[in-house]
Image (cartoon, rainbow, N blue to C red):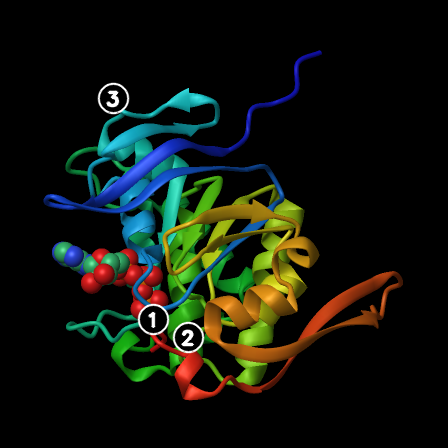
Amino acid sequence: MASAPPLLELVGVACGYGTRTVLEDVSFTVGAGEILCLLGPNGVGKTTLFKTLLRLLPLRAGTLRVGGEDCAGWSARRFAQAVGYVPQAHSAPFPFVVRDVVAMGRAARLGVFGSPSCADMAVVDQALASLSIAHLAGRPYTEISGGERQLTLIARALVQGARVLVMDEPTSNLDYGNQIGVLDLVRDLAERDGLGVVMTSHDPNHALGYGARVATIGRDGAFAVGAPEVVITERYLRETYHVRSQVLCVPRPGGGEGRVCLPMGKEPASSCAGSV
Ligand SMILES: Nc1ncnc2c1ncn2[C@@H]1O[C@H](COP(=O)(O)OP(=O)(O)OP(=O)(O)O)[C@@H](O)[C@H]1O
């Protein structure tokens, strides 16, 4: 029996703005239950790639497939039913209550002039409960914490019913406990519901701890994908970020072993040209 196609597949994708190409020849897949973590220094093109795979920027070359199907001709509505986006938790201009912000995620599933039905709101309430934020339902989105906003935005993406989640630095602005809580949650969602997740992070330990695979973008635009322990090496961290580090093998609580990165300091300024 043929195996199921990947939930998301990029083949030879190029992206950029105007006459400027930012990234070329980007290829990767994300399967059901898998987290792909995208790492790279500031300004190398992570957001540009995300905007392209969300179809907010045109593909300059290559193919974007969702569930094995080229989605070039898909309507925005069909695409939104398949791919959900979790942006960084910025503040919103209007004080919608949390339940209404989450309900906006149902838009792709409503008729043209439709408003959410009781069944839609039941899906919303279920998502709030599954993320343990039901108590925030009536609170204005503008008056909750960064961590609570991040959970609200994840709930909004979940009610879209999409099987692919694209998450832009889901841990930015979160305290340590909320970072680990959000990453645990993302892993649970991927494993339990068979979602495919692509997320960016600036912390190599997030990729080592949570990414089934890691994609790196170098300062020269070089794109590489592989297992975290193969891609995130002391050499990679030194050459890309000019940081001396140790990547250590540690036992995992549930058995087996994992890796953690211990930064040992920045390289001297003379070898840091180009770093931010
Ligand atoms: N709207 C735009 N028009 C033209 N160039 C842009 C635009 N937005 C970003 N760029 C440029 O494209 C390049 C990639 O930017 P991008 O925001 O994708 O980087 P990034 O890897 O997401 O960075 P960061 O980690 O700082 O968020 C940068 O050189 C940036 O200046």
Q: Earlier in the sequence, mark 1 or mark 2?
A: 1
From the image, tell me which residue sits under label 2.
172
The residue at 28%/77% (across/down) is 140
Left or right for 100, reference 241: left
Residue 182: x percent and y percent?
54, 69
Examine the rendered structure and indicate whether residue 200 appears above or below residue 143: above
Mark 1 crowdedness (10 Å alpha carbons): few <14, some 14-19, many ≥20: many
Q: Dot 2: what SS?
A: loop
Q: Dot 3: what SS?
A: loop
The residue at 62%/57% (across/down) is 187
Q: Quadrant of the N terminus?
A: top right
Amino acid bearing label 3: Gly
Query: Which quadrant holds residue 249?
Result: bottom right
Ligand 1 quadrant?
bottom left
Left or right for 98, reference 232: left
Mark 1–mark 2 contact, CB under 8 Å?
A: yes
From the image, tell me which residue sits under label 3.
73
Q: CA distance from mark 3 to mark 2?
A: 34 Å
Amino acid bearing label 1: Ala
Q: CA distance from mark 1 to mark 2?
A: 8 Å
Q: CA distance from mark 1 to mark 3?
A: 30 Å
Examine the rendered structure and indicate whether residue 266 appears above or below residue 97: below
From the image, tell me which residue sits under label 1.
89
Amino acid bearing label 2: Ser
Q: Earlier in the sequence, mark 1 or mark 3?
A: 3
Residue 237: x percent and y percent?
55, 69
Residue 29: x percent and y percent?
52, 36
Mark 3 crowdedness (10 Å alpha carbons): few <14, some 14-19, many ≥20: few
Q: Dot 1: what SS?
A: loop
Examine the rendered structure and indicate whether residue 248 appears above or below residue 117: below
Q: Earlier in the sequence, mark 3 or mark 2?
A: 3
- 27 or 76, which is in the foreground? 27
